Amino acid sequence: MKGIESVGTENATARHHKKSPPPWLHAFWPRFLFLLITFLLVNLVLALLINVSVSHWVSGLLVGVAAAALALFLYTRIVGWLEQRHVVELARSEARSQLIRGTAIGTGLFVTTLALIFACNGYRLHGGSFWAMLATLGAMTGVAVLEELVFRGVLFRGIEERFGTTPALVVSALLFGGLHFFNAEGTVWGALAIAVEGGLMLGAAYVLTRSLWLPIGLHLGWNFTESGIFGGTVSGTDGAMGGLLTGVPRGPAIISGGTFGPEASIFAVLVCGATAVLLLRRARKQGSWR
């Protein structure tokens, strides 16, 4: 008859094996593709729900926040199970400080960009809606979380694990920008601008902190300020979702961003590009480069 200690050890081992992924997911490429496909599908489904919900401020706010929470929960559980580790890139201890810091920086970067556009007479503001702003806040919360989990949490992390930081930055930035080319008002220049502003800068934020909270905060701060406060079109989408103000570009598209939105302005590229360089220099100095 087996001793109590022996039975307990076997039960613990059985529970561990039950939670472990199947052998075919142990290798890098099957694991990477499984994660990528899974979270692309999660992104697609939840993004559709967010788009439908923004017609009313209550549903827009609630669905956007709920989608973000669900995506974070799924990422933590699936990545933790698949990679058999604690998901340190979403450590709760860093969530509040990094989100506040990132949102503040993202807000400041967009305000700086818009101030430069204003100085060149490239933008006009009219009245908007407080309730539309709340719907946009919910939507942008969901969008920021969903896109960061896919592009930094899965794509960047996977490529970096296999090939290093530099290839991960280049590939994830180009794919992030390329995805926005297919938006309603997408252009080649707009996609390249997003590759720098979103792909490179947000990738740099992850490299520096090794946390997804800072890029999520940056993403949210920029997008919400752009659309929810100043009523700008985000990344060539079909018009602004609605904001406290309504923004109208004017003059040369290289200054205002034209129909793609302020993100296609040369000022946005310069402001975010400079920020990316600063973040990457700090990352190299502190030894975060792999």
Image (cartoon, helix red, strand yellow):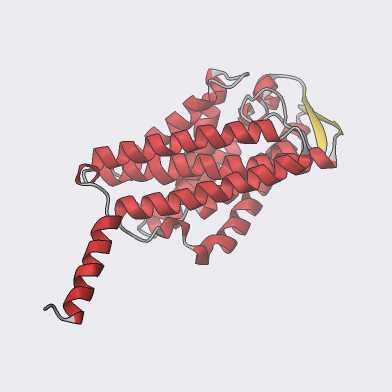
- Furthest toward the front, the residue is 1
Give the answer, above or below, for where 138 lies relative to 267.
Answer: below
At horizontal 32% and vertical 50% (from top left) the residue drawn is 82
Q: Nearer the viewer, residue 96 or 268?
A: 96
**Residue 80 sits in which quadrant?**
bottom left
Outermost right residue = 127
Q: Is residue 282 left or right of residue 216?
A: left
Side of 246 relative to 151 (left or right):
right
- Residue 181, given in percent of the width and then of the height, sits at 53, 21
188 and 228: which is toward the camera: 228
The quarter of the rendered structure image containing the N terminus is bottom left
Whether residue 219 is visible to the viewer of this picture, yes or no, is: no
Residue 207 position, x and y percent, is 42, 51
Is residue 222 left or right of 273 when viewed as pictured? Answer: right
Residue shown at 46% from the left, 49% from the top: 74
* Residue 186: image location, x then y, percent: 58, 20
Q: Is residue 163 above or below residue 188?
A: below
Examine the image and state in which quarter residue 223 appears.
Answer: top right
The residue at the far left in this view is: 1
Q: Is residue 17 left or right of residue 171?
A: left
| Residue at image coords 19%, 69% | 10
**Above or below, 181 relative to 53:** above
Residue 170 is situated, as x and y percent measured from the top left of the image, at: 39, 35
Residue closer to the observer: 137 or 14 = 14
Residue 213, visible in the rendered structure: yes
Q: Residue at x 27, y 49 (%)?
A: 21
In this figure, what is the number of numbered marks? 0
